[in-house]
Amino acid sequence: MTALHEEQHLTDAVNSVFAQDYLGTVELVVAVGPSQDRTRDIAEDLAAHEPRMTVVDNPTGRTPAGLNLAIAATDPATRIIVRTDGHAQLPPGYIRMAVESLVRTGAANVGGMMVPDGVTPFECAVARAMSEPIGLGSVSFHVGGAEGPAPTVYLGVFRRSILEATGGFNEHFTRAQDWELNHRIRETGAAVWFDPRLQVCYRPRSSISGLAKQFYGSGTWRWQIIRAYPHTASLRYLAAPVATLALGVAALSLVVNTAVVHSTVVGVVALAVPVSYLVLVAVGCAVSRRGLDMAASAWYPVCVVTMHLSWGTGFLTAALRDAARALVSRLPANRAGRPRLRADAA
């Protein structure tokens, strides 16, 4: 388990591990980052009362680094590694069912669904947006599906041997490290298995700013994944950047047309882009709003738009930044003999 700024959820997350009905031996290693709340104190107090729990430092606070540190601190004889975090609550039968699936399927990693569970109307709207195709696309660990091989799964229950064979989590990827590791696992010929019975409660962000920051980061790191593995680019990952770019171009066109061009055709075409996008969002949200109260329903399309545009902006910003760095790195030295700028100086 990794934990950073998890004062609110850590106790429940830890208790969910020790409430498992798995009959084998279970130990918990929590890698705690430099939190600005009482996360470390809570972790230490929980470990003082639970001999099966160990706390280790994660100085960088980065999730992949913390996961690797936690794995390294486990008993070397442990054959199965269950990945969780301080923001998740494992259901009582999670480990038992996952191990059964590992044995039955021969997979290297088994995982299931992230099930967002909100409390406030805003959180409920975020939870719905994260569980419907209109929000994050039709990926099984968000929207469900049949049991079977999958590109990636939520969290994961791994054979230790596959983590050793692949080198564990790639610490370059602050986000999407699960996807990246599962990609490398599948490249070895081993299977990543989706089991819809494994449903883990996830607490969604509670504010627009928090949601926007989360998805901006997700978009940024999705670009890094695509840059590292270009063949993995797909409509699901490119839809938000394309929509964001189209909306940006349309907005710029409207401004220029109003100030300079004064063309009715240009204005209509430019206005059609945001209107079409908002209509699609409104229809999609109306179709999938079942069970939401009036307040959550009002927040729902706002959350969807925030997720799309934040993801798209993060993706495009990262892509443009890398393009600028690549361009700068190719600039020749000037006549005064100044050295060429490094790519990371941009």
Image (cartoon, rainbow, N blue to C red):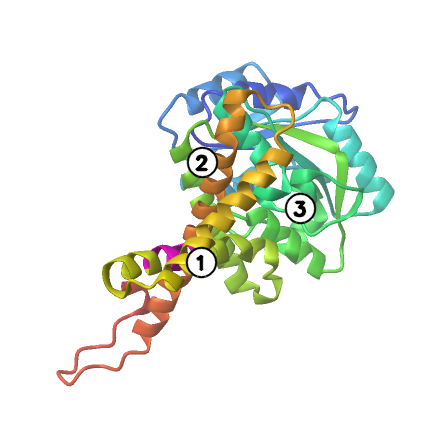
Please, is residue 268 above or below residue 341 in the view? above
Q: Residues within 10 Å of mark 2 (few under 14, many from 20)?
A: some
Q: Say the numbered circle drawn on residue 138.
A: 3
Q: Which residue is mark 1?
A: 246
Q: Split into 4 quadrants, where in the image is the N terminus?
A: top right
Q: Split into 4 quadrants, where in the image is the C terminus?
A: bottom left
Dominant secondary structure of the residues highlighted in magenta in the image: helix
Please, is residue 338 above or below residue 153 in the view? below
Q: Position of residue 250 (x, y in %)?
A: 39, 57
Under mark 3, the amino acid is: Ser
Please, is residue 69 above or below residue 185 in the view? above
Q: Quadrant of residue 254?
A: bottom left
Residue closer to the observer: 257 or 290: 257
Task: Using the numbered discs, state the Cα–Cα distance from disc 2 to disc 1 in whole angstroms.
Answer: 22 Å
Q: Earlier in the sequence, mark 2 or mark 3?
A: 3
Q: Is residue 10 magenta?
A: no
Q: Report whether residue 284 is seen.
A: yes
Q: Is residue 248 magenta?
A: yes
Q: Residue at x 55, y 48 (%)?
A: 177
